Structure formats: structure tokens, C-alpha cells
Image: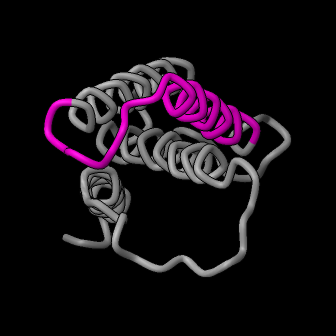
């Protein structure tokens, strides 16, 4: 059962992980003295890149490859962008020391685009793994 639904489990786990990290306050944690410029935006980009990849793989798994790759990419992209916007709104509405930022939405969107493009590249005709089962 788990083996047939591995990408679904990974996707749901990733969404729960993102939600927890996005709504939890890290203001009391000591991050040390290392400062990386735009580390927050890089993190958002990477998190949503993974979101896009896992969403596409989950859709492939759930439809057993019957959903066209382009359609799966569209749905994954829409879901990632909508989720990123919802999380930013929740940060604004529910948390006291987290801020909603347009830059985060942009980084999320770019990461999601990169994720679905990575999937498109991986399942291209030159790759041995095919989208359909």
C-alpha cells in the first residue's frame, strides 16, 4: 500500500512540513553569526521547487500516468502558487512575529516553476523514464 502511494505520502508530508515551518515562530532561536544574503528567499525557492516536483509525481501516481504531463504541470503549478499565497495570508492573519511578504510569493512561484520544469525535463523524450506507466 505504501509503496504504491509513496509520492502521495511524501507530498502530504512535505505540505505539512511547509505549513509547520511557515506558521511557527523562530524569533527565539539563535541562528549564529553567519549571514547569507537572501537566505529566506532561497529557502522559499527550494521549498516550492520540491513542492512542484512532488505534486507532479503525486498526480502521476494517482492517475497512473493517465493525466497528461502538461496538465499535471499546470495543476501542480496552480496548487503551489495558491498554497504559497494562502500561507502568506495566514502568516499575516494568524502570527504575531511572522510577516507576509510579496517577495516570498515571488520566490515561491519561481521555485514552483523550476520544479515543474525540472519534471518536464526529466520526463522528456530523451529520458528513459516515461510519464505513462
For this rendering, which residue is in front, 130 or 24? Answer: 24
Residue 5 visible in rendering: no
Residue 39 falls in which quadrant of the image?
bottom right
Q: Position of residue 48 (x, y in %)?
A: 51, 43
Query: Which stretch is magenta?
Result: 93-121
- Vertical comparison of 20 with 32: above or below: above
Residue sitting at the far left: 94
Left or right of residue 54, residue 18 in this image: left
* Figure label count: 0
Left or right of residue 91, residue 115 in this image: right
Left or right of residue 34, residue 24 in this image: left
Residue sitting at the far right: 126
The verdict on residue 116 being magenta is yes
- Vertical comparison of 130 with 39: above or below: above
Q: Position of residue 130 (x, y in %)?
A: 63, 44
The verdict on residue 85 being magenta is no
Tell me which secondary structure the magenta stretch mostly adopts: helix
Left or right of residue 105, residue 45 in this image: right
Residue at x 29%, y 60% (from the top left corner): 25
Q: Position of residue 81 (x, y in %)?
A: 43, 24
Residue at x 46%, y 29% (from the top left corner): 101
Colouring used for the render: one colour
Q: Position of residue 14 (x, y in %)?
A: 35, 58
For this rendering, which residue is in front, 88 or 18? Answer: 88
Residue at x 40%, y 76% (from the top left corner): 29
Residue 54 visible in rendering: yes
Residue 112 falls in which quadrant of the image?
top right
Q: Locate the N terminus and report the quarter of the image it occupies.
A: bottom left
Residue at x 70%, y 47% (from the top left corner): 38
- Vertical comparison of 88 with 14: above or below: above
Amino acid at each position: 500500500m505504501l509503496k504504491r502511494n509513496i509520492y502521495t505520502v511524501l507530498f502530504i508530508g512535505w505540505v505539512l512540513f511547509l505549513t509547520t515551518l511557515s506558521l511557527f515562530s523562530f524569533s527565539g532561536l539563535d541562528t549564529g553569526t553567519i549571514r547569507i544574503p537572501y537566505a529566506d528567499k532561497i529557502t522559499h525557492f527550494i521549498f516550492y521547487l520540491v513542492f512542484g516536483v512532488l505534486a507532479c509525481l503525486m498526480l502521476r501516481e494517482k492517475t497512473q500516468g493517465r493525466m497528461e504531463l502538461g496538465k499535471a504541470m499546470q495543476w501542480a503549478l496552480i496548487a503551489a502558487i495558491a498554497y504559497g499565497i494562502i500561507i502568506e495570508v495566514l502568516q499575516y492573519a494568524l502570527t504575531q512575529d511572522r510577516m507576509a511578504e510579496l517577495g516570498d510569493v515571488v520566490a515561491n512561484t519561481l521555485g514552483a516553476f523550476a520544479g515543474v520544469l525540472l519534471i518536464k525535463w526529466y520526463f522528456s523524450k530523451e529520458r528513459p523514464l516515461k510519464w505513462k506507466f
